[in-house]
Amino acid sequence: MVNLDDLKKEALNLLKDEKVKYIIGYTEGSNGTSAAPAFIKNPEDTDKLVWNPGCFHNLTRFLRDEKKRKAREKHPDERPVGIVVKGCDSRAINVLLQEKYIKRDDVFILGVSCESTGVIDEKKVAKKLKGKKAQKIEWDTNRNLVVTTEDGTTKIPADEVLAERCVECPVHSPVVYDIFFGDKIKRTTDAQFKSVEKIENLSQKEKWDFWKKQFDKCIRCYACRSVCPMCYCDECVVDTISFAVTADTTAEEKAQRIKWIEKSPTPSETFIYHIIRAIHLAGRCIDCGECERVCPLDIPIRFLNKKLEKEAKSLFDYEVGFDPDQLSLVSSFKDEDPEDFIR
Amino acid sequence: MKKRTGVFVCHCGINIAGTVDVKKVADKLGKHKAVAHSEDYVYMCSDPGQNLITNAIKEHKLDSIVVSCCSPTLHEKTFQNAAKAGGINEFQSEIANIREQCSWVHKDKEKATIKAEKITRSAVERVNKNESLEPISFPVTRRAMVIGAGIAGIQAALDMANTGYEVVLVEKNPSIGGHMIQLSETFPTLDCSQCILSPKMVEVSKHENIKLLTYSEVQEISGYVGNFNVKIKKNPTFVDPDKCTLCDECTKVCPVLTSDEFDLGLTGRRAIYMPFPQAIPATYTLDDKHCPGLLPIACGKCADVCDPGAIDYDMKPEIIEEEVGAIVIATGFDLYEKEEMGEYGSGKYPDVLDGLQFERLCSASGPTQGEVLRPSDHKVPKEVVFIQCSGSRDPEQHCAYCSKICCMYTAKHAMLYKHHVPDGQAYIFYIDIRSGGKGYEEFVQRAVEEDGVVYLRGKVSKIFEYNGKIRVWGVDTLAGKDIEIDADMVVLAQAMRPSKDADKLAKLLKISIDKDGFLQEAHPKLRPVESVTAGMFLAGAAQAPKDIPEAVAQASGAAAKALAILSQENLFHSPQVAKSIPNLCTGCGMCVDVCPYDALSLKNGKVEVNEVLCEGCGTCSATCLRAAIEVKNITPYQIYEMINASLGG
């Protein structure tokens, strides 16, 4: 079992010894089921850290802000940032290392094992509670979610409330860390790509109709992009607003900014946005599922990324986030790679 | 700034004009706001056509041109030169390919004309955003390397060395000479192969401009045309050639007997050996694979008897680095293994030989001193069956291609056999006789008429041992009969295949191989001695099966091509290379990993382009998620404008 007190103690020591700038972790959220990201600078605040089934956020996304902040500072604090990561999140760190976006010394990783469970899908829990408000949630030792409401406690089997990605998760515990909390349990899954099969089994027309319906909902709020640890480009192909302008950006460069996609959320443009994002995440997405979780319109974005993850694995035997030194999917090849699509 | 572009639409005879209304294309484009002048002409690539462009540039004060014609691989350079002659930068010229990409692939004239307009319009958009560029100049290392020292490699090395340039000749075997030195006589003149080759070998060894590295293999290569850096591993021979007096005492005491590569297993040799008497360099080699114990020394007999002390068991592989400007690859061929031929006994029967073994059997320096004898019982074979296309022209089972030389050498074999055994009978099974070449057809006729060789048109289905003879089951398709011959010896004209490990070398050198594993030429007709990589040239049977005169001709051709590089102090490189946009670069290094030319590197977290190495292929640009690298004159912005132009009405 993950001992929260150990986590708090280590965090306290790190801050007291001034080994880290601050710690990105989880704290109690406002609605009982969800935890909330916390940025802890004062040693005494380490007591606010929590570890529970509602810690579903991928905190590595905040490393992007840290990097940008640091770039702006004249005399940046070179100490690392402490960060609490789950198995999936730790793979995101490996991708950021692989892409040289961060250096290993930039982070002090507090790796927490998901052991035999994972994190919850809030929507699944809400359905089970039928409108009641949770005050506290935790896993018991028999893979049950113990929910405390004003009416007392109820037990729900883990498999009924786990986030889908946790059911399909191949790692369960951090693959890169400085300190490890909990038990290193080897767990395998034979259902790593089960969710995509639902879509794969549809006919071409059914697929088209499905995605048309889904993308029609999209309001292009870009929450999926904002929450994604891999969407760290300064300039995104979909919106001219984010184009990087620095002191040496010439008028000619500004004039040559291409508007590949219209801003309006019309079906064709929205399709292109999601397809480009999926392609740009091929071989980079570590399936933290955050894009889908934050979507206000419930678009199953994760299917797209999961499908590409499956393609990468089945075609090229490529899995991302385990080795920061491996070449990226698109910049590497093996002699035995299939090439029957070249005609 | 508004451009003044000239549009020139070519008819290409009826190649384009037959399907595209060229006048209409020229008229329509003439109305484009950036086009100051447009016209059409029957052959734009002709001299008058080029003059027309040059004059139009001057007359209409054009600052850029678009030529709507054939593929840029054919005439891009022509029209760049025409632009230059007109006084504008050569990179202000673009091609709109309305032949391969339009007229040749369409039938509907109306629609094809619209498409041609769109292609041309998008080229106008592109050229409007072209930068004026100057070719990048860089110095040349004026030495060459030849890989493989068979007849092709020897010829290429001598041709280059004789013009005064230094040549490094690398050979993986202990001696130079290749397969030609194994041959007995050569068709169609029947002159002795060793007699005509050994003078060239001697010339190589004595040539002051040739640095010979035998028993050596290329390990690593970096650099680019004009400046290659090659790392070569020289394997230890364990014999110091300078001390060795060729007394031959060592082979007398060596206890090991192994099969002789030079005689293709027809004889044996010792673990310390000289490949053949005329070997260059003339020295012994200790074969560490067969020596009973080198490290630690378990035998040591050869060193004991070596008076001059030439044998050094501590010799280590040596890595030699060479800087060269051009490379000729002449790695030759190997025979398709008899073991692959299940229907012909999988190499089990001692009296079933391949063509090269039969050469050794006929050779005056061979295992039988030129007497044709059966390897099994040393009797003179009275009936010999020669089987052509053994492994060749058999796409289902073996090699799909024709090995080209077998028709001729089988006729020669039959003839040589008759010269050695006048009362013997030679049969040749063939599919077709391919005797194209000077004096070749007459040679085959001579075999039939003067030497009474029986040609049987048909395939052999099976051969097997029967009563001490080799029974051959075949068919004569002209007579429509099954044939059964109890032969004393069978000779298989095995297919030629690329030499072993040629594919690995090709990968190392980053040149391509074709579907059969032969080295790929840049163009099958017009650039047959060039590889697709600049500065690397092909010679001999490494590129395709060929006979000696062809191999020699190609070697001289490759040498001439290499000399065209060496004869220049500086080379020029296209400036249409990648350019990084540091603001957008996050330093992820994907482009660095993906670059096939090693032209990119990371410096202070940003990508940097080595312009001399960059070929402008654009793989980096396609890989970059952040559009932080692009190729000059084909930038995303230009592509965007081109797409707009082709989509717009």
Image (cartoon, grey):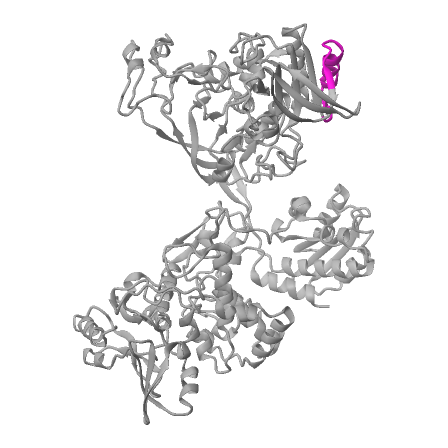
Above or below, B292 against A7 in this view is above
Along the line of sight, the residue nearer the viewer: B456 or B486: B486
Q: Residue at x 34, y 18 (%)?
A: B239
- Rendering quarter of residue B588: bottom left
- Percent coordinates x, y for residue A179 in the rendering: 24, 66
Query: What are the residue bounds of the magenta stretch?
Result: B431-455
Q: Quadrant of residue A36?
A: bottom left
Which residue is outermost to the top? Answer: B422
Residue occupying image coordinates x 28% and y 62%: A105
Is residue B448 in view?
Answer: yes
The residue furthest bottom is A151
**Residue A25 in the image: x percent, y percent?**
29, 76
Which quadrant of the view contains residue B632?
Answer: bottom right
* Location of residue B587 in the rendering, given as x and y in whole percent from the top left corner: 40, 59
Q: Is residue B591 above or below residue B282?
A: below
Q: Is residue B442 left or right of residue B183?
A: right
Image height of B299 relative to A27, above or below: above
Taking the image as shown, residue B376 lies to the left or right of residue B602, namely right
Q: Residue furthest front?
A: B467
